[in-house]
Image (spheres, grey):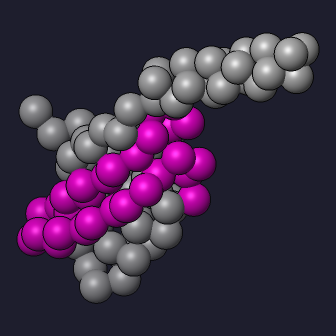
Amino acid sequence: MKTLSIAALIATVLSANMAEAAERTVTLNVANATCELCGPIVKRALNRVPGVLDVQITEREEFAIAKVRFDDSRANTAALIAATTNAGYPSQVEQ
């Protein structure tokens, strides 16, 4: 009986933590990313952020657009912006 109660408690805790996590998508405008090599560098930097699930890069003449899908219990927009900035490509959330 005690084992069943402990198992129920563990299941409750795990399901509560899973309920708090949500998948989010953010679009970043990435400055200075105007060449063929820039997109892969930005993508790699974003993929290194724990919690990032997918990154899609669209290159434009004046900047790149990064569409990032992530687990918001493990990553946030500030971490994504820091990753691109540290790679040499400052970014901001698309308005």
Residue 92, percent across and down?
27, 39
- Of residues 15 and 57, the one drawn nearer to the viewer in this rendering: 15
- Of residues 45 and 11, the one drawn nearer to the viewer in this rendering: 11
- Of residues 53 and 85, the one drawn nearer to the viewer in this rendering: 53
| Quarter of the N terminus within the rendering | top right
Would you say residue 6 is visible in this rendering? no
Would you say residue 66 is visible in this rendering? yes
| Quarter of the C terminus within the rendering | top left
Q: Which residue is drawn at 21% across and 46% down?
A: 27
- Of residues 59 and 67, the one drawn nearer to the viewer in this rendering: 67
- Report which quarter residue 71 is drawn in: top left
Q: Residue at x 32, y 52 (%)?
A: 68
- Report which quarter residue 11 is drawn in: top right
Q: How many marks?
A: 0
Residue 51, percent across and down?
53, 46
- Left or right: residue 84 compared with residue 4: left
Start-end of magenta stretch: 48-76
Q: Where 49 falls versus 95 (above or below)?
A: below
Residue 44, percent across and down?
49, 69
In the displayed orientation, state which residue is furthest to the front: 1
- Left or right: residue 8 compared with residue 17: right
Q: Residue at x 26, y 57 (%)?
A: 66
In the displayed orientation, state which residue is furthest to the bottom: 36
Q: Residue at x 52, y 30 (%)?
A: 18
- Report which quarter residue 2 is drawn in: top right
**Residue 58 drawn in magenta:** yes
